[in-house]
């Protein structure tokens, strides 16, 4: 398939689906949803020839089907002696993960390849692991892959998942609105400066600078990681009432009390209820993973050529190794018992990690590719015909390059307790603090007790 044909195919998929990153319906390090997609949509490649291996692929994201087919065609062109035919099944999020769990436990009915959402992945890393180790398949690309994204799907040095993107957390500033208020976003380096800019902006305009999240933890997780904190301690025990967590939430509450930062309909920036408030200028700033670029392009067209992408603030400019973190994600895994596991691993590593595929991850989807070799390709990252380049006021990859070696994760992302932690924070803890005005320590203590009871089976 020619490149133009590939782009056309994938653009059609983007139009047909609301998926363009890690859409967050429950908050936290979100799940990529399949809204508007039938519960068991199927797609099969057409591949000529007799010596073709069929690989069954499960996903909960319709857009991945189209991308996988397009890139598998590229694989077949380059490997005529190892051609594959992908037969893809698209299912609802919970249905697919539950069906996979049952198939791995029973040893029957599992696919060859499966997409597993970041928050669900830890559940498949306990007991007898039914997924294939992918170290050998990843090795040819590993030098240029952001290590923290591989770490999410790694246990005891064995890699089990192929990441879709980095999801680098960045700052989206409405440069026009800030300039009109006498603020230069490039001067904002620390959280104190971010807060001060917010107060100045609110006093000048009467509008909100940025939002306080209640259904997601994008900013909370970022600030916590920068402090070296986490939801669990070094021994894997729940640690919601830590000094770092308390400081982060107290700081955000202090932002809210200035009047310049406020909760938003939908509880976070990546929500169809929130998009209009940014599109009309009621809020000026978002702290979000890089894939939010697609939301701007698709849902906030009125502020095109007003928004700049910049590095996120830090606590102190010289502190810590982690300046930002990856947010959201789906790991593509290979079922260990698959008859074609070795070939499936090589094919999917090509589809998820190769430079060729990662160029299309940016060109069409607007994701920040996990293969950083493409980050310095100016023909790609400064292409004037790219719709994401056309939308923003600066080159998005300029910020990525500055934080390339300081992108971290929270270790709790890989812990089986994280889905419950995420659910508690996004449905109870954050709402208690930022909507109901509960004391931070009290809210964290209550959530700690709730989850302790859950994990003890009480």
Image (cartoon, grey):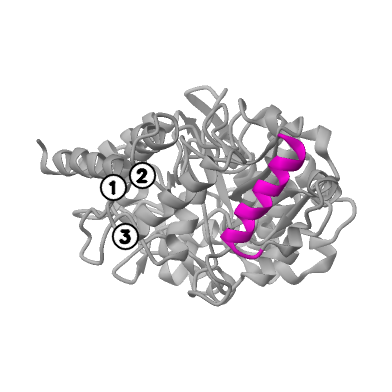
Circle 1 residue: 123
What segment is highlighted magenta in the picture? Answer: 189-206
Marks 2 and 3 sit apart, C-alpha to C-alpha, by 28 Å
Q: Alpha-carbon distance for marks 2 and 1?
A: 6 Å
Label 1 crowding class (10 Å Cα cut-off): few <14, some 14-19, many 20+? some
Of discs 2 and 3, which sits in the foreground? 3
Residue 16, given in percent of the width and then of the height, sits at: 68, 28
* Residue shown at the point (44%, 71%) measured from the top left: 136
* Residue 359 point in image, percent of width and height: 72, 59
Mark 2 in CB contact with mark 1 (< 8 angstroms): yes
Q: Of helix, strand and loop, which one carries label 1?
A: helix
Residue 294 lies in quadrant = top right
Front in this rendered view, residue 453 or 174: 174
What is the x, y in percent for residue 390?
A: 86, 48
The residue where tag 3 is placed is 243
For label 3, the SS is helix
Contact between marks 1 and 3 (CB within 8 A): the answer is no
> At 80% from the left edge and 52% from the top edge, which residue is drawn?
3
Up the image or down, 322 lies above or below 176; here it is: below
Q: Which residue is mark 2?
A: 120
Q: Is residue 389 visible?
A: yes
Label 2 crowding class (10 Å Cα cut-off): few <14, some 14-19, many 20+?
many
């Amino acid at each position: 398939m020619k490149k133009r044909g590939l782009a056309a195919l994938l653009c059609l998929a983007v139009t047909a689906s609301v998926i363009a990153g890690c859409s967050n319906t429950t908050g936290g390090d979100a799940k990529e949803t399949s809204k508007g997609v039938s519960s068991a949509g199927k797609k099969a490649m057409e591949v000529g020839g007799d010596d073709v291996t069929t690989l069954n692929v499960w996903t909960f994201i319709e857009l991945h089907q189209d991308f996988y087919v397009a890139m598998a065609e590229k694989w077949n062109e380059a490997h005529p002696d190892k051609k594959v035919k992908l037969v893809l099944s698209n299912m609802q999020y919970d249905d697919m993960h539950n069906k996979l769990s049952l198939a791995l436990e029973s040893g029957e009915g599992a696919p060859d390849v499966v997409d597993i959402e970041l928050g669900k992945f830890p559940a498949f890393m306990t007991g007898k692991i039914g997924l294939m180790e992918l170290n050998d398949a990843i090795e040819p690309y590993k030098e240029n892959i952001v290590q923290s994204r591989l770490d999410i799907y790694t246990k005891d040095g064995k890699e089990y998942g192929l990441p879709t993107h980095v999801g680098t957390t960045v700052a989206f500033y409405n440069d026009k609105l800030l300039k009109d208020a006498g603020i230069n976003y490039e001067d904002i380096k620390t959280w104190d400066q971010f807060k001060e800019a917010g107060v100045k902006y609110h006093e000048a305009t009467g509008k909100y600078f940025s939002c306080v999240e209640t259904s997601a933890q994008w900013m909370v997780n970022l600030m916590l990681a920068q402090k070296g904190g986490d939801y669990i301690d070094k021994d894997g025990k729940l640690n919601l009432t830590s000094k770092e967590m308390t400081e982060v939430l107290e700081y955000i509450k202090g932002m809210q009390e200035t009047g310049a930062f406020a909760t938003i309909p939908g509880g976070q920036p990546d929500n169809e209820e929130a998009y209009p408030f940014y599109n009309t200028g009621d809020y000026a700033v978002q702290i979000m993973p890089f894939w939010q670029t697609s939301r701007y392009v698709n849902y906030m067209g009125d502020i095109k050529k007003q928004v700049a992408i910049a590095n996120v603030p830090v606590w102190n400019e010289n502190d810590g190794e982690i300046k930002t973190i990856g947010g959201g994600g789906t790991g593509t895994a290979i079922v260990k018992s698959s008859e074609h596991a070795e070939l499936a691993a090589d094919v999917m590593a090509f589809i998820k990690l190769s430079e060729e595929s990662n160029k299309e991850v940016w060109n069409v989807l607007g994701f920040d590719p996990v293969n950083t070799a493409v980050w310095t390709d100016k023909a790609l990252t400064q292409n004037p015909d790219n719709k994401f380049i056309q939308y923003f006021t600066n080159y998005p990859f300029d910020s990525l390059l500055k934080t390339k070696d300081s992108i971290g994760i929270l270790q709790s992302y890989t812990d089986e307790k994280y889905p419950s932690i995420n659910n508690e924070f996004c449905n109870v803890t954050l709402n208690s603090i930022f909507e109901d005005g509960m004391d931070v320590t009290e809210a964290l203590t209550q959530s700690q007790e709730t989850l302790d009871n859950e994990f003890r089976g009480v």
